[in-house]
Amino acid sequence: MARVYNFSAGPAMLPEAVLQQAREEMLDWQGTGTSVAEMSHRGKAFVAIAERAEADLRELLGIPDNYRVLFLQGGASSQFAMVPMNLLRGKGEADYVNTGTWSKKAIAEARRYCAVNVAASTVDEPLGRAPAQHELALSGERAAYVHYTPNETIAGVEFSYVPETGVVPLIADMSSTLLSRPIEVSRFGLIYAGAQKNIGPAGLTIVIVRDDLLGQPLAATPTMFDYKVHADADSMYNTPPTYAWYLAGLVFQWLKARGGLEAMAEVNARKAALLYDTIDASDFYRNPVDPGSRSWMNIPFTLADPALDARFLEEAAAAGLTALKGHRSAGGMRASIYNAMPESGVEALVAFMREFERRHG
Ligand code: PLP
């Protein structure tokens, strides 16, 4: 079967060139006679793969030298606990911004370790929205850190700016936005992301953390949840997710070959604009997000008649456009258009949407 355009929010599409290269190297990586999946993580070959992946990620994001890059397991969900366990550093409070499902999960987990001040919440508003800077009721230096979710994957709500938090470290769950455009890493104390959207396959979690924040975990922090343990061991304290790390490295090389994150940002902005313009030009489709907070990566939309949802999904799948069903908590549709979704995929989707509307609208 021909490859489909897969609009899943994660695990998401990977670049075809990356999958091709992995296939070519599957049985014999560069004349070693072994697959990367079979290599010792401490052997020379894998260490070279790991180091190159980190160097390429550092180059792509312009990560300053005083930040450590960790290649971990446990998903972004483990970070909901690791962040408070490691970053409270003697304080009993942290500020959280609540913009949707993933913020709520981070908040619920943090409450196990500290008092959470919800600095702003937009989750009860009719349209999804990122609060403006002036709406953030930050606690200043009483808070150990400020946590937010730059892109809410389910609601399709994205911040168009980086909150200003003064000397208080800003922590960002960038699971569904990291690598979609350039960012200024020095604005953040810590960035984390599950890999299965823009980075690589599931099973790998990237953490980028300023080194002065390491080394003061809560007393009961499990060894595996202590960032410093992983930083000191170059993410090889235990067996890391080697194959996912290798595939992420191939994705980083692919991004560099395509011109890096500035170039990706241009393509991603074009893809998102095409889809939003199609939705806005029609009375048949609707996006439930404030226009100033619309995500480039995850675009939920509803049909005027929900009774047509099943038909839309069925006909879309028959046209090679898959995984468009909205999250079970949101209903409707959602098109996730991460880096690996080519422009031709979004063009095919909007052509299908117009045609479906013509027949059913
Ligand atoms: N945070 C965000 C923004 C997400 O989109 C997701 C998953 O979709 C998670 C956290 C949870 O990630 P994981 O499944 O890797 O734990």
Image: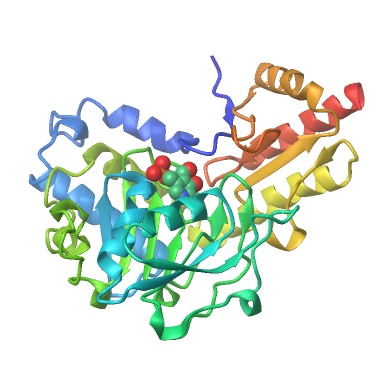
In the displayed structure, would residue 318 be above or below residue 130? above
Q: Residue at 53%, 80% (x, y): give it.
A: 164
Image quadrant where one finds the N terminus: top right
**Residue nearest the observer in this picture, 169 or 67:** 169
Residue at the location (19% across, 59% down)? 226
Judged left or right of residue 189, residue 140 is: right
Q: Is residue 305 above or below residue 119?
A: above
Whether 336 is drawn above or below 167: the answer is above
Residue 139, horizontal then vertical, whole percent:
48, 80
Residue pictured at 82% horizontal, 38% vertical: 285
Tell me if residue 198 can be seen: no
> Where does residue 184 sit, x and y in percent of width and height?
47, 73
Give the image's coloring scheme: rainbow
Q: Nearer the viewer, residue 256 or 297?
A: 297
Q: Quadrant of residue 64?
A: bottom left
Q: Residue 223 versus residue 339: which sits nearer the camera?
A: 223
Looking at the image, how many numbered discs can be counted on the residues?
0
140 is higher (above) or lower (below) than 280: below
Horizontal side of residue 83 vs 283, given as left or right: left
Find residue 214 and report its horizontal and vertical position in percent: 22, 71
Nearest the viewer among 93 and 169 is: 93
Residue 97 placed where, x, y %? 53, 65
Q: Is residue 271 left or right of residue 306?
A: left
User: Can residue 284 be seen from the camera position used here?
Assistant: yes
Q: Quadrant of residue 124?
A: bottom right
Drawn side of residue 36 relative to residue 310, left or right = left
Quadrant that contains the C terminus: top right
